[in-house]
Image: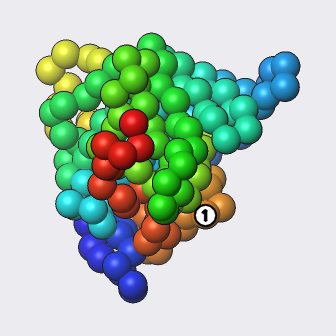
Amino acid sequence: MVLGQRGTAVLGRPAGLTVTITDPEESEGTGSARAKSSLTVIQNPSLEGRLGILMAGTTILNGDETSFLNAYVMEAYGDALGSNMLHLDIAKSTKQRGNPLLYVLAYSNGSPYHTASQLPHEICKITDEEFRKFEAALTTPNQRAVELTGMLNNMVQLIGQRVDAFSLDNGKLVLPPNYANTRFSSQYI
């Protein structure tokens, strides 16, 4: 991880990494948009040097609330995936009142993720095949570090290429400085 201009965090990728891009599918639900699978950055690396990513098998967008079904929450430190991964049946990103207004990710048991965002959480649509490939890498026992690093770098590249609010700078993910960088306070519960 390297800090860019104005404290913007960037996460690099090793040379020679190849990313295959396919168009994700989307269907319309009743009164809401549904992406079959998605990746969402939930913690900006500029906060404590960690990148937080939520991967969901199904994503439902409904106004100011986004629901993530069959979700995995993971944190990365540079190119290394942290050992603590959480699997959830459901998680929700909701807009919370306060000063400043924050977008908070809450788990199905009501407990919040420790980082909130001043900007809405951005959704990176991925294909079901990409989801299954990432899920297999995350859940296979005794996974090698190099395979997990490759998976993480593939996720970063997809997010940087598919989310308009983010970008890639020489293979590094660039996030807005006020995106997912606010330590969560109990006043928003």
Under mark 1, the amino acid is: Ala
Q: Is residue 162 above or below residue 123?
A: below
Along the horizontal axis of the image, is 154 left or right of 23?
A: left
Quadrant placement of the N terminus:
bottom left
Q: Residue at x 34, y 38 (%)?
A: 113
Residue 133, percent from left and from top: 45, 25
Q: Which residue is drawn at 34% across and 27% down?
A: 111
Dot 1: element:
loop
Along the horizontal axis of the image, is 110 left or right of 183?
A: right
Q: Nearer the viewer, residue 126 or 94?
A: 94
Q: Which residue is drawn at 45% across and 48% down?
A: 41
Q: Residue at x 56, y 38 (%)?
A: 94
Numbered circles on residues, count:
1
Q: Which of 112 and 46 is in front in this view?
A: 112
Asked if residue 147 can be seen in this view, the reply is: yes
Q: Nearer the viewer, residue 67 or 80?
A: 67
Quadrant position of residue 38? top right
Q: Which of 24 and 20 is in front in this view?
A: 24
Quadrant position of residue 73? top left
Residue 131, percent from left and from top: 51, 27
* Residue at the extreme bottom of the image, as rendered: 5
Residue under label 1, please give it: 165
Quadrant placement of the C terminus:
top left
Q: Residues within 10 Å of mark 1 (few under 14, many from 20)?
A: few
